[in-house]
Amino acid sequence: MEGALEYLIENPSQLSYLLVLGGLIAAGLGVPITEDVYLLASGALAQRGVVSLPGIFGVCFFGVIVGDILIYVIARRLGQAAYNRPIFARLMPPARREHMEGLIERRGGLIVFGARFVAGLRMPVFAIAAVHGMGLARFLACDIAALVLSAPLVIGLGYLFSSEIAAVAAGLGSARNWILIGVLCAVVAVVAGYALRRFLRGRAEVVKEDEDSKA
């Protein structure tokens, strides 16, 4: 990872946008260089004035989404045969796959959302979701919601700490885990608050009905 990261940063050119775009699409399809390399490099290149920050944001979002859609479309067309592909078998052995299939059947959207934060799960989880019939619109909604949180963070880290990019890359996995935990806690808090409001509203209606019946 560090070698690819250093190459992108130390060899800036007018082709940087295309290199980032192509790299993100390839990473989404399972090439063994993670998306984070290109996102971090994009931030560092923007900080050094090689690319514009808004422009590289757009390129990164487009490249990631295109890669994810290609995973979805290929897996949907292959169906169960997608599980026989070597890269899938390596990342998601049968026992792990069966466990993930059960999770996707019960909490498909949430699992797709969470997979965006875990590099090793991203591609196989997206493929399983497609094979199991998750609609493209729902898939993209969950994926984009997670991407809106994760991509600006990684690009921003590359921008702010371009001189310490290797250290940032090394600790990025932990940072993503904390973000995911924070998001899940926020979701639980919102759901709990909604449930509490409904409960209190129901209690208030019961009390009002009792008072009306006594009157």
Image: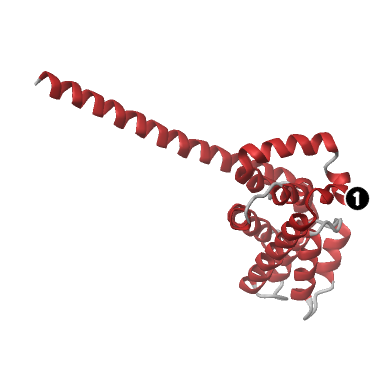
Q: Nearer the viewer, residue 160 or 35?
A: 35
Q: Which part of the image, by quadrant, shows the C terminus?
A: top left
* Residue drawn at (42%, 35%) of the image: 193
Picture coordinates of residue 89 (x, y %)?
87, 45
Please tell me in which quadrant of the rendered image residue 214 appears: top left
- For this orientation, the residue located farthest to the bottom is 14
How many numbered marks have been drawn onto this rendered protein structure?
1
* Residue drawn at (86%, 62%) of the image: 4
Q: Which part of the image, by quadrant, shows the N terminus?
A: bottom right
Q: Does the rendering let one see residue 164?
A: no
Please tell me in which quadrant of the rendered image residue 17 appears: bottom right
Picture coordinates of residue 152 (x, y %)?
62, 59
Q: Nearer the viewer, residue 137 or 177?
A: 137
Q: Does the rendering let one see residue 140?
A: yes
Describe residue 119's horizontal placement relative to residue 142 as left or right.
Answer: right
Residue that mark 1 sits on: 86
Describe residue 208's horizontal placement relative to residue 72 as left or right.
Answer: left
* Type of the residue with mark 1: Pro
Picture coordinates of residue 63 (x, y %)?
71, 67
Picture coordinates of residue 206 (x, y %)?
25, 24
Q: Residues within 10 Å of mark 1 (few under 14, many from 20)?
A: few
